[in-house]
Amino acid sequence: MNASPQAPPGASPPRRGRGLRLLAGVVVTLAIVAGAAWLVWSRLNPFGENSIDRSQPALLQSIHDLSRFEAATGNFQVIVDLEKDAAFLPDAVKGTRTLFVGAGGVDAYVDFGGLSSGALTVSPDRKEVTVKLPHAQLEKPNLDNGRSYVYAQQRGLFDRVQDFLSSSPADQRELYQLAEKKIAEAAQASDLRDRADQNTKAMLQGMLGGLGFEKVTVTVDGRP
């Protein structure tokens, strides 16, 4: 049999091998260029946004001594359904309807600062003590921004155009105010104040009993 011919010494490799190496080099070069371009674009993206907080430090304006006992907290949630209609235009043209979920808490407290001089009486043998407390009061509702949000909203054509052209679209202040009002009404109608009264009584009975009084009587605003 005849031996297959061999390439003479110093001959160049086949063109197919050179083509594959050249193609691999081009692919690697393109990958490097694409990665560098992406890195530069991510750092110099003209459409990107950076948040810079230039707010000044908070300043302490005043300090008030507290003489109240925070006795109970109620958590409330309300759905505000606010609709605004135009007198002579259909809702599709002019009008809005917004469903807003408002969530927040209301604190109930007993104010010890307003106690009269006769609110605390001690028996001559210092074994009995009587305390007369005012009825618990309610703080202003504190809405939780993290749990309060617009659930749904319908707007007429004019309202959409107005919001688009306005530099300051309609805010949600009215929705928050309505939610606070409704939560305050719900807290007033609940037993939150009575719960605060009972918690305050239990606190005083335990504290005064620990001071050595054998009988502790606590009354709240004429209640037994």
Image: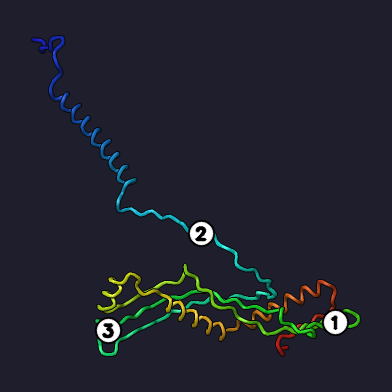
Task: Look at the picture and state if 28 lies above or below 182.
Answer: above
Q: Nearer the viewer, mark 1 or mark 2?
A: 2
Q: Which residue is mark 3?
A: 91
Which residue sits at x=57%, y=85%?
188
Give residue 132's position: percent from left, percent from top.
75, 84
Q: Which residue is mark 1?
A: 122
Number of the front mark, 2 or 3? 2
Give 219 or 41, whichever is nearer the viewer.
41
- The picture quadrant where one finds residue 32 is top left
Give the Cα distance between marks 2 and 3.
Answer: 44 Å
In the picture, the disc for residue 196 is none
- The amino acid marked with disc number 1 is Val
The residue at which mark 2 appears reads as 56
Which quadrant would residue 137 be assigned to in this image?
Answer: bottom right
Local SS, label 1: strand
Task: State the quadrant of the C terminus.
Answer: bottom right
Badge 3, how many Cα within 10 Å: few under 14, some, many 20+? some
Q: Horizontally, is 83 left or right of 93 in the view?
A: right
Give above or below for 14 relative to 201.
Answer: above
Q: How far across and down, in percent of the image, does residue 187 sit?
A: 55, 82
Specify the amino acid type for callout 2. Answer: Gln
Near mark 1 (Cα within 10 A), the count class, few <14, some 14-19 or many ≥20, is: few
Task: Residue at 70%, 78% (x, y): give it.
Answer: 200
Residue contact between numbered discs 2 and 3, judged by CB atoms under 8 Å: no
